[in-house]
Image (cartoon, helix red, strand yellow):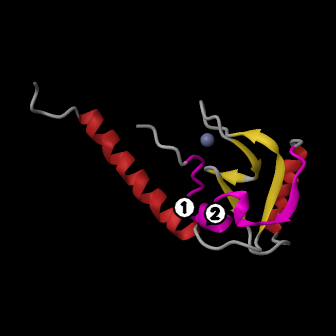
Amino acid sequence: MAARPEPGRVELEQELEWLEDDEELWHEDAAGDHAGWSCVRTEPFPCPAEGCQFVADFMTAAHLILVWEERDDPNLLRHAERAKQVGRNPRIVEYEPSFGPSASYYAWEAAGRPVHAVRAD
Ligand SMILES: [Zn+2]
């Protein structure tokens, strides 16, 4: 066995570690009680990540329902408008925890907009 590690592999592992730290920070930031916030219900659409079977009924990021504090947030309206243009029939509804895990849109944006939370092992 070679005693020396393969440089490429070491780099990859370091990068994954960093991504995990970042993701935890994001979840910590984004988590919370978002009941009464607004989210966007849409026609079912599959997760854009390759090979992923997840189908969303809401506007989501990394399988978390994106929520906005204000129903008339211009950013929320802009996203709903875009969903409408691609035929996803968006409806702005009040978020309820029974819908599934949520994430604050602005926490998601601040985290660099991660699109997928599922890690490859
Ligand atoms: Zn996915």
Q: Tell me residue 98's x, y (percent).
A: 72, 61
Residue 99's place in the image compared with 57, above or below, is: below
Residue beneath the point at 48% across and 57% down: 23
| Helix, strand or loop status at disc 1 | loop
Gap in angstroms between the C-alphas marked 1 and 2: 11 Å
In front of the other: 2 or 90? 90
Q: Are marks 1 and 2 in contact (CB under 8 Å)?
A: no
Farthest residue in the top direction? 1
In front of the other: 29 or 78? 29
Q: Tell me residue 66's x, y (percent).
A: 70, 60
Q: Check the picture and name the quadrant holding the C terminus.
A: top left
Q: Amino acid at mark 2?
A: Ala
Q: Amino acid at mark 1?
A: Ala
Q: Which residues are magenta?
A: 88-116
Q: Tell me residue 57's x, y (percent).
A: 77, 48
User: Label 2 crowding class (10 Å Cα cut-off): few <14, some 14-19, many 20+?
Assistant: many
Residue beneath the point at 86% across and 62% down: 92
| Helix, strand or loop status at disc 2 | strand
Q: Which residue is mark 1?
A: 111
Q: Quadrant of residue 111?
A: bottom right
Q: Tell me residue 9's x, y (percent).
A: 29, 35
Please give the label number shown on residue 103.
2
Q: Nearer the viewer, mark 1 or mark 2?
A: 2
Farthest residue in the front direction? 98
